[in-house]
Amino acid sequence: MDRKELLKHVHIKQGDITREKTDAIVNAANPTLLGGGGVDGAIHRTAGPGLLEECRTLGGADHGEAKVTRGYNLPAKHVIHTPGPIYKNGYSGEKEVLTKSYYNSMLLCKENNLKSVSFPAISAGVYGYPKDEACSVAVDTVLNFMEQENYIIDVYFVLFDRDNYERYEKYIASLQIGNKNSI
Ligand code: AR6
């Protein structure tokens, strides 16, 4: 399937990911997988204590890995937990690790035959990843995965603030007109 067709399955929304009714939401976690601040805190608060209980059985995850749980009190059926990279200087493998977070999350979607998934901007908060590159890595990795694996899923990028929503909107528009390097 060509890129323009695949792009029809990539959607953006502004808001709170804990309200998403997709088959899975992705959590920008830390390696303990035992909760934290930001989107991680919001997901655990809404899901309730069952989520933390299941997370305790997972044994943590390395940066770039992904593990799946049930969604408990969330409207989404599953939560995919992935610690993104902590941004240092851009020369410490950050881009590879962020790509792995998206890739491994998509792999779990495929293995579980999911039809829809919602992603936050992994690593673009407390972990300090520059927002423009965090956006292009996110969109490029899900498109590459769908193309290479011949797997179609509706992907929603759920951006908390207007500024980041507009960043994704602009980047996706640039792909639609075939100009990959506009941001
Ligand atoms: N829905 C959607 N996006 C959100 C929400 C929400 N409810 N809340 C925040 N964001 P961050 P990271 C956005 O810091 O950078 C945690 O303590 C936020 O605006 O949550 O991967 C973990 O335990 C930002 O754009 O995740 C780790 O220790 C994006 O989500 C650490 O933070 C990611 O911000 C992970 O840091």
Image (spheres, rainbow, N blue to C red):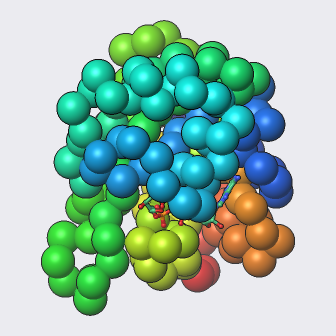
Q: Does 20 appear above or below 144? A: above
The residue sitting at 82% across, 71% down in the picture is 162
Q: Quadrant of residue 94?
A: bottom left
Q: Is residue 34 left or right of residue 38?
A: left
Residue drawn at x 58%, y 51% as measured from the top left: 41
* Image mark count: 0
x then y, percent, for residue 64: 27, 50
Residue that sits furthest to the bottom in the current view: 89
> Which residue corresponds to the image point at 36% horizontal and 53% vertical from the top-left?
30
Across and down, in percent, residue 101 comes to: 35, 48
Extreme residue toward the left, this view: 92
Query: How far from the left and from the top, in percent, is residue 17?
Result: 71, 44
Give the answer, above or below, for where 23 lies relative to 46.
above
Q: Residue at x 70, y 26 (%)?
A: 74
Give the camera-side residue of 49 and 73.
49
**Left or right side of 18 for 120:** left
Would residue 75 appear left or right of 70 to someone viewing this image?
Answer: right
Based on the displayed image, in which of its 4 quarters is residue 78 positioned? top right
Tell me which image quadrant ligand 1 sits in: bottom right
Q: Is residue 10 visible?
A: no
Q: Quadrant of the C terminus?
A: bottom right
Q: Residue furthest top?
A: 113
Residue 90 in view of the camera: yes
Q: Position of residue 148 (x, y in %)?
A: 35, 33
